Amino acid sequence: MMILDAVIQGMLLGGQYALFAAGLSLMFGVMRLVNLAHGDFAVMAAYGTLIVINAFAVSPVIAVLVVAPVVAVLGYVLQRFLLQKTLTESPLPSLLVTFGLSIIIQNVLLMTMSADQRRMTLGAVDTASLTLPGDIRIGVFPLTVFLFAVVVMAALSWTIAQTHYGRLVRAVSDDPATVELSGVAPHRVYATAAAIAFGLVAVAGTASGIQTSFSPMSGSMLLIFAFEAVIIGGLGSLWGTLAGAMILGVAQTIGASFAPAHQILAGHLVFLLFLAFLPRGLTRKAGTV
């Protein structure tokens, strides 16, 4: 029963990781860009939500409805006027620029918000739980985050597969030069994808800030979890990312059930196993959306 409980808790934890990883997977699948500042933007959004909460005395749910669109616009502007210039055949320019953004965000947050740990609360929802057969308890908020992650993945997958914008995304992902000849501006498609990714990052950062404490230096670990989920699931695959996040979460909770101090290590070990035996991830398709 202990293992079953660990698996269920790990799947719920995977929902949180999937939210972080969705934007990373989308940006790589569309424009082959790995954003090393991904976790730092999530932390920045969490602080933004905290500022709105303190200024207007609203719940985090209301605050994130304000912060997420702002961060989405920021993502659009950054992609349009900065990250677009780094999209070359070599991944090095984008890695260097986003690494620089990561350092800048961390230091600005340290100067303005201090290094203290912060956390947001939803009141009674934080500790509310449902009881399953076998006396297994699952938190209401983690379950909500997991279900939201599934809805997000389904919505993104449907958008990519069924809509006009999705067809543009697939076309630009495969051959941006040819698409440009048809009158479509690839940079606008990229910028819209970045806006979606950054909006999701804002929601994920807020959700994480409710479930656990955060500081200006928390972004690096969030990036690692998102990156591991994307690699396990398969680069650019949205449903693969969800599966990879759940595998990572289950690995961590099972590891914690045997050795609580080694929870994070257990996830890293599973990640290394995938790198060794399934380097292209569960989907075995690189660079797709």
Image (tube, rainbow, N blue to C red):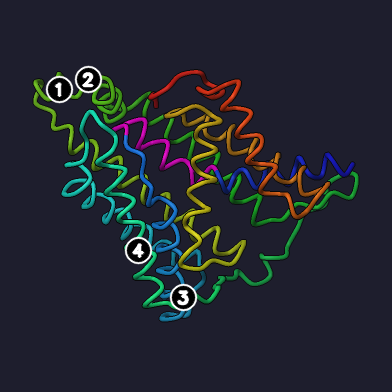
The residue under the point 50% across, 64% down is 61
Disc nearest the viewer among 4 and 2: 4
Which comes sooner in the sequence, label 4 or label 2? Answer: 4
10 Å crowding of disc 1: few (<14), some (14-19), many (20+): few
The stretch in magenta equals 18-32
Amino acid under label 4?
Ile
The residue under the point 14% across, 22% down is 177
Labelled disc at residue 105: 4
Q: Are marks 1 and 2 in contact (CB under 8 Å)?
A: yes
Q: Are marks 3 and 2 in contact (CB under 8 Å)?
A: no
Q: Secondary structure at mark 1?
A: helix
Cα distance between the residues tagged 4 and 1: 33 Å
Q: Is residue 263 above or below residue 154?
A: below
Chief SS of the magenta region:
helix
* Residue bearing the label numbered 2: 175
Which comes sooner in the sequence, label 3 or label 1? Answer: 3
10 Å crowding of disc 3: few (<14), some (14-19), many (20+): some
Is 203 on the left-hand or right-hand side of 243?
left
Q: Are marks 4 and 2 in contact (CB under 8 Å)?
A: no
